[in-house]
Image (tube, rainbow, N blue to C red):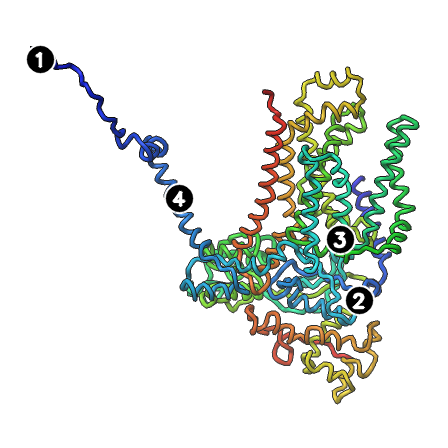
Amino acid sequence: MTNANLSYVREEMLAPQDPPLGQTGVIRWLRENLFSSWLNAILTILSVWFVWTVVSHLFPWFYNSIWSGGSLNECREIRDATLGEGASAACFAVISDRWQQLLFGFYPSDGYWRPILALFLFLGSIMPVLFAALPRKLLLGTAAAPFVLVWLLWGGSIWVAVSVALGFVAGFIAYRVVSSSIGSSLLAILAAIAAPILYWSVLHGPVSGAFSGIIPIELPKVQSKEFGGFTLSVIIGIAGIVLSLPLGILLALGRQSNLFLIKYVSVGFIEVIRGVPLIAWLFTASLLLNYFLPPGTNFDLMLRVIIMVTLFSAAYIAEVIRGGLAALPRGQYEAADALGLDYWLSMRLIILPQALKISIPGIVNTFIGLFKDTTLVVFIGLLDPIGLAGAIRASTDWQGIYWELFIFIGLMFFIFCYSMGRYSLYLEKKLQREHR
Amino acid sequence: MKKTIFLGALTVAGLAATAASASTLDDVLARGKLNCGVSTGLAGFAAPDANGVWQGFDVDMCRAVAAAVLGDPMAVEFVPTTGQTRFTALASGEVDMLARNTTWTFSRDVDLKFEFAGTNYYDGQGFMVPTSLGVSSAKDLDGATVCIQTGTTTELNLADFFRSNNISYEPVPIETNAEALQQYNAGACDAYTTDASGLAASRATFENPADHIILPEIISKEPLAPLVRHGDNQWGDIVRWTLNALITAEELGVTSANVAEHAAAAGDNPEVNRLLGTEGELGAMLGLSADWAVKAIAAGGNYGESFERNIGSSTPIGLARGLNALWTNGGLLYSPPFR
């Protein structure tokens, strides 16, 4: 029975071993993701080759960038001296030489703080609108912001801006008084329109003049012609965005209205504006209006462009919001009626909050498009960043430089558009518009 | 019918515009600034420098007029205009004059109702080719691919030239000058054609300018001229004679350096005296002060000085005087006499 101790199975455990080399770590990942079949292997190799070609050309160009020098030829001399003849190097000296111009156009250089402060003021004043967590009292500041910003950018006496703002206050008071005493909302709206017009045509001049006489607070005036570069793009873009949203909402509601006139005026406006390219409207603003306006009237070109851009984007916004309105179930409208709300209350409390929530991606999309479309003003002779790039290239110092300018301009636009896109994502997440 | 009404309204608006505008000179004096239409950017002719101050050959013309009228060469509001907006800007009164390397043609003068105030630069269409192509005359370009900007007179001139010389070519149509140069440098075409001044300016910015030559043939006439609206002859005269004053000053040897000295007292040369207002009443006839030409010359120098500073052989653009030399030096610049 000497064999009784023999066992058929091992008595001790085998030490665990590493998995085969091909089934672990990087190699496994590579095999699964990049070389899982012949086709994928070929595609992988081709992609790597492509990426390598692009990077190997672009990296030295960026890495060797030259940031000092007064002209393209100086750039080339520096490059030849430090890197050897014909090396690939970007000449970003053009940016360090002309960045003020690209950002501010011909804005007086001792006033550069004004557009910068205006941008921060704008961002600050828009915060209570964008983030509901902030106290609602701040909205008063938001309402005052447009007047402060216009005064800051164009200069002049602060009392002109204050007095213009008083006109809106007069309208608001007229609305309150009429609606509480007579109770007719139509009359109240008419009063709210009439009061500011009366105020502006009669009292505006004396009021602003009197206050300027007593407490003169003035900034040096800046003409619209002196605006340029990103200041111009951002002003046109922001003014267009801020003005076109309310106008677009009104147009979308108008298009759904049961009133014949309002409905077909809205439809006609939207279809006509949307059916013609923006560049054609810009040419209308800059060329055709000149013939119709009486000579000597100085209707600011920048204002004309802002109006055209606003109308154009309002038509698109209206259609985006109409999509949101159409997506609401009929029951929502009926529920609002059943509660006894009038038209404006039901829109404000029930319909629009839901419709706008649905339309957020579309609205932000339109705004991003609008902001980038501001570069079209180059065709009517306004010097936006693209136009200034042309003007900079026209100086003998920088003729023949292309990519560096366009990369800078592209980067600036990307920063603005990307932040808008991120905000829209944040808003969507917060409002959770999907039915869970 | 509706169209007629529309056109009628346009005409009325146009007539009203003509009738209502006071004299341009009064407008400019009241405003204290000259509105001058320039290019949005053309090397050597008009471009803002790093401080945002406009510089260039066309810009100097604006400054000379501003100096003559207002006494201050910096009292100019430059309005950048594109090829499309330039004529409307002038016709609608947005600018008082246009100095935007605009070719003087029959239809622009007669049909568009402008008044050209004399040529300030005689240009012409030329060709640029790489030296390696081994071509020395445009007539050797048989079968060549030629980069050309679309929608310009240069396109038509090119077709005319090749047809009249019985040789063939293949056009590569391109939208802008910058793009055309990229294409040319990338070898997409054998030759690039545009105004000779533009060719020279572009060639100067190449990495190796010596690798490219500008062929001797000039195949078109492009007299570039400042222009004003029809109907205000006094203003037209002011611009025309400011240009003539700059040309005459060069002819008489009056420069920005010595103009003050010449103007201090009447000298031996009666024409210099008349030009600078130390003798005669020429300034008053224009409705300007007696020393209008002194200020215009002091602003940017005489024609030759402005040429040398902006586009002449000492600049990177390096244009020779050529046709733009004085008639006494074999060029075309010939100002009527000041008397």
Looking at the picture, do discs 2 and 4 lie on one chain? no
User: In the image shown, does A26 or A103 lie closer to the viewer?
Assistant: A26
Label 2 crowd (10 A; few <14 / some 14-19 / many >=20): many
* Number of the label disc, if any, that sits on residue B235: 2
Amino acid carrying mark 2 in the image:
Trp
Image mark count = 4
Given this view, does label 2 or label 1 mark the residue nearer the observer? 1
Q: Residue at x 66, y 22 (%)?
A: A327
Secondary structure type for disc 3:
helix
Given this view, does label 2 or label 4 mark the residue nearer the observer? 4
Given this view, does label 2 or label 3 mark the residue nearer the observer? 3
Amino acid carrying mark 1 in the image:
Asn
Looking at the picture, do discs 1 and 4 lie on one chain? yes
Task: Classify residue B4 by image quadrant.
Answer: top right
Q: Residue furthest left?
A: A2
Q: Which residue is mark 3?
A: A154
Q: Which residue is mark 4?
A: A50
Looking at the picture, do discs 3 and 1 lie on one chain? yes
Secondary structure type for disc 2:
helix
Q: Is residue B205 left or right of residue B74?
A: left
Secondary structure type for disc 1:
helix
Q: Quadrant where the C terminus of chain B lies?
A: bottom right
- As measured in the structure, the alpha-carbon distance from the residue carrying label 2 to the one carrying label 4 is 63 Å
Q: Residue at x 75, y 56 (%)?
A: A223
Q: Is residue A255 above or below residue B218?
A: above
Residue B294, horizontal then vertical, whole percent? 75, 77
- As measured in the structure, the alpha-carbon distance from the residue carrying label 4 to the one carrying label 3 is 50 Å
Indicate which disc, 4 or 3, sits on the residue closer to the N terminus.
4
Mark 2 near mark 4, Cβ–Cβ under 8 Å? no
Task: Classify residue A254 by image quadrant.
Answer: top right
* Number of the label disc, if any, that sits on residue A3: 1
